[in-house]
Image: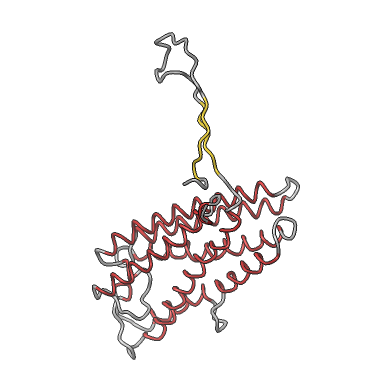
Amino acid sequence: MWWFQQGLCILPVALVLWTASTFIFDYITAVVLRHVDPLVPYISDTGTVAPERCVFGIMLDMSAFLGVATMFVRYKQVQALTDEEESKLHKLNFLGLVLGWTSSFGMCIVANFQKTTLFSMHLVGAILTFGVGALYILVQTLVSLYMQPHVHGKSIFWVRLSIGVWTFLLPVVLLDFFSVFVSSVIMYNSLPGVDVAHKLHWIPGEMGYIPHIISTISEWSLALSFISFFLTYIRDFQKITLRAEVDLQSNHMYDSPHYSITTPLNQSETSPLLAGCI
């Protein structure tokens, strides 16, 4: 059995690989078709013009679905491993689920409301995806803190804490989440009369170019840190299996009895749904 076939670790692996593939595929397509500049464009800019816009929406919606599934499994795992009297941990766990699903919903908004189509909704989606997503990482890091050492070791906590620091801080102590929006505000205010939302090409040296580069680098860094966090779930998810049990309530599909069937039927079935045999 391969390592990715153990338990449900295929969920976080698929989430990370699919989301990364979405960004890479759209970036390559947009650059080849000369819809954006090669030097760190906004992620949203790479999915603004057809045909990459269509693929971007479909693939990002799938990422949101994988995110919802992964976060739910994580929620159920922590719930099962936590004693009932640990109310603080249960509240943090539920808060993490709400934040995670909200972030996934924001990803759907980003996927379906392009920057050049409805900028205000796209901005709301970006805030939900990255802003609330950063809070999700913070909450899950706190959950890991309270679960060690009786559930897992300190190493996984330090790894998640490091990714959390990366999420909130750029290597040069610039706030990652805030630098995206602060740089964007500076850029928009420094270009009066220019429709920045529809501006996909930038010339080095022009007004607003430096804030634009800072903003795009921050966005890519934030996105990379966010999806990297789910790699820390792989080892945990290898210890989980999910099975579906079918319990038949009747031996026919009619609303009322039609035939008198005397042969007893096997009215229960247990089969793997998402287990290592996929």
In the displayed structure, 46 sits above or below 241; it is below
- Give the residue at x 49% y 52%: 68
Residue 35 drawn at (x, y percent): 26, 73
The colour scheme used here is secondary structure
**199 on left or right of 4:** left
In the displayed structure, 190 sits above or below 268; it is below
- Give the residue at x 70% y 65%: 154
- Give the residue at x 44% y 62%: 17
**24 on left or right of 177:** left
Of all residues, the one furthest to the bottom in this rendering is 205
Instruction: Note whether residue 101 is visible.
Output: no
Residue 203 drawn at (x, y percent): 30, 86
Residue 199 drawn at (x, y percent): 29, 76
Identify which residue, 11 or 105, lies in the foreground. 11
Identify which residue, 39 or 116, lies in the foreground. 39
Q: Residue 115 appears in which quarter of the rendering?
A: bottom left
In the displayed structure, 104 sits above or below 134; it is above
Q: Residue 213 appears in which quarter of the rendering?
A: bottom left
In the displayed structure, 266 sits above or below 234; it is above
Residue 112 drawn at (x, y percent): 34, 58
Q: Residue 168 appears in which quarter of the rendering?
A: bottom right
Identify which residue, 65 or 266, lies in the foreground. 266
Instruction: Note whether residue 247 is visible.
Output: yes
All told, the count of numbered labels is 0
Of all residues, the one furthest to the front in this rendering is 1
**115 on left or right of 5:** left
- Give the residue at x 50% y 50%: 69
